[in-house]
Every structure is written in structure tokens, then in C-alpha cells.
Amino acid sequence: MIVRLIGIFLLLLNTVEAEELALGASKADAQATVGCLFPMGGRGGIYGQDSVTGIKLAFEHLKKQPLPYPPIRVLVSDSSSKASKAARQVRNFVRKDGVRFICGVVNSAIALQVAEVAEEEKVFFIGTDHASSKLTRGKVRDYYFRVSNNAEQSMQAAAIYIKKKFARGPRAQPLKLAYIGPDYDYGYQAWKDLRARLDAEGVNYQVETVLWPKLYEPDYSAYLRALVDKKVDLVVNALWGGDLVAFIQQANQTTLFEHARFANFDTGGNYEVLSALGEDMPEGLILSSRHHNNWPQTDYNTWFVERFHALTGRYPSYAAEGAYAGILAISEALRVAGPEASDQALRDALSSLHLKLPEDPEGFISFMNPLNHQLQQVIAIGETVPDQRFLPARMMLGNWMIYHPQLSNQPE
């Protein structure tokens, strides 16, 4: 009986340890505390694990810089991809740990709720992964800043790409388009953003079908039959993570990729997807991501990817660079404004942020748009091509088309 009780105690202790992790400066030395929320287990656990390594790499990078950055402490908690838990964790971070910054959150629906709580608690929420454009649209949120590109930016580049690759004159038959996205805010916003940009670019298209599978859908057979039956020219897919992996695996058993081009312009080129599919990833899919391991081919990106691999034995998903950017953004704001700065001074520092990141090509530095608190970044769209330099992925992206923010009317 005693042995059993000890076993239960150790199990509970390990569970707590798995959910709570402290990184960076000690509690005594820290001049600011950051609370990060990521899923650490289950289907989205890779995002949390990669984010933790991204945070460690951010601290490594900051130590090498000649400028003095205030020491910060980062507390990572497992959100379990649950909105109610994440909201409760934000309040605990603020009231128990005295955090001034919240960072992370993978799911856009959860991020929307976390943003509301952050505004109530008057703490800055640095979004590192979720991509719904709703958070950076309309009235600007005083305490919200996002450091990875959102779906609106991805779909702006997507519309220009479609216009270039699939352009059809007004007298020709319109491009037959199908869309399939997750049945929640991110999927809805991505579809709205894509249509708005296609219309703005004057693309001649016709929507044949729109499909909304639920998040974590195990069986896409009905959706695949609907897509195959429509005989569309282009399928735009907004699924992500394990859902996209499952969709492509199941689509391989159909004729979908034989009669239609397939694109996922926001998350499809994530290394998590490329590695999970391995030899099952078809050639010629049109994909993009918020960070690429093989683009840009700069010393900075090479260091980030290789150092991540040295620490973990695997290559990073885009979540790693998102978390890395979040810690750099917070550190830079604290350096500029000072650890004791007012909220307005920190807001001004974040609003004028310029941040050199691994995903930035030569000659470009990511910068914050002060009007909506959305970081502006270069977006690279490519096609899957055979490439075994980043095993277990057997396909990486190539045949790149590159789009700059604000000036993305013409790709490089």
C-alpha cells in the first residue's frame, strides 16, 4: 500500500513538473517575468516542445550580443489546448508569479480568449504561433502584439501567387477553386482573407465547394470524395499539424493530387508536416510556412536550424522560431524602455520594434506595424521537391517565390 501511495505521489509530482518549467534568470536575478502557454503533450505537443527549445536558443543568442539585455525569467505552462485552462493560467501567472508578459498560444480560438484576459489584467500578450487575423484587425489591442505572420499576410501572398501561376483572363473559364479549412476561427478568417485578396488582385475564380472538418478530424474520406467529385483546378487547404498530415495520407489513397493542384499557404510547409509524412509527401504540392529550415540560406538561419538539431536531435517546426522571436521581442522592448518602464513606454517600444530573425532574408529585418501590432515579414511560397538533407523529411520546398510585406505586388 505504501509503495502504491509513493508511486501515485511521484506520478503527480512528475505531472506538475511536466506542466511547469522555468527558463532563463533565477527568480532572484530576474528583472521581468514572462509566462508562456503552449501545449506540451498530445497532438499539439511538438509545438510546445519546439517552443521551449526556441526559448533556450533565444537566451543563447542574447548572451552573444554586445548590448545589455535585462535578465528575464520565463515560466512555461502546459495549456493542454484548452481555452478555459489557458485563461486560468494567465490569471495565475499575473497574480501568483507577477508576470508582465504572456507569450505563446498555438490555437487561434484560445488566443482570442487569452487576449481578452491579458487586456483585463493589463499584461502584454506576445503572440508567437496562432494566426487568425481577427486579433490584428479593427480596434487595435493595447496589450497584444504578434511576432509571426498571420493568415491575412499569408493569404495576401497566396492571392498574388495564384494570380501569377493560375492567371486567367476575364473571357476565359474561371479558375475552379475549392477550400477546406478547420471549423473554427482560424479556418474562417483564412478563407475570408483569401477571397478578399483574390478579389483585390482581380483573379477570375469560381468557388466550387467549401468544406469545414472539425479540428482533429480522424476521417477525411467524405471530404475527399467531395473534392474529387468536383474536379476543381486548385484545392486550397488550411488544415495544420497532425490534421494536415492525416489529410494528405488519406488523400494519397485517392486521385485528388492527380487531377487538381493542392496548396496550403500558411502552415503546409512546416517541418513537422514534412517530417511526419516522409516518403508519403507527394511532389509538387504548393506550400508555405512561418519558418523554413532550408530558406533563407543565411548564416543566421543555418545557426538556428543546426543548433536546434544539436540540442534535440531533430529539426525545428515553425513554432520554435515563433517562441524565439517572442523572447527576443520582449527582451528588446525591455532593453529600450527599461525594466521599470510604464506600460505606455513598453507599448511604444514594441510598436516600433525591428527584429532580425532567422527567417529574414539578407537585407530585410522584420518590423512591427504600429497600426495593428502585427510583425511584418517576408513570405516564401514553394513546391515540394525531393531533398533528403533534413531527414526524416524526404521532401522539402523549392522553386521559391518570395513576397515582401507591403511591397508584395511583385515576387522576387
Image: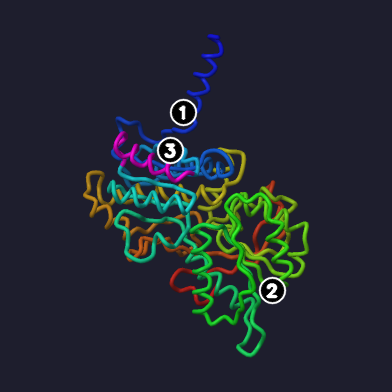
Residue that badge 2 annotates: 233
**In the image shown, does 378 or 371 lie closer to the viewer?**
371
Magenta span main SS: helix
- Comparing 244 with 265, the one in front is 244
Residue depicted at 53% across the width and 40% down the height: 49
On screen, residue 403 above or below 166: above
- Whether residue 371 sits left or right of residue 276 in the image: it is left
Q: Residue at x 44, y 33 (%)?
A: 21
- In the image, the segment drawn in magenta is 82-99
How far apart in space, not on screen, are marks 2 and 3 (Cα)?
44 Å
Q: Which residue is mark 3?
A: 76
Residue that numbered label 1 is attached to = 16
Q: Earlier in the sequence, mark 3 or mark 1?
A: 1
Is 336 displayed left or right of 298 in the figure? left
Q: Is residue 228 magenta?
A: no
Instruction: Say what amino acid the circle numbered 1 marks.
Output: Val
Q: Which amino acid, by three-letter code, is at mark 3?
A: Val
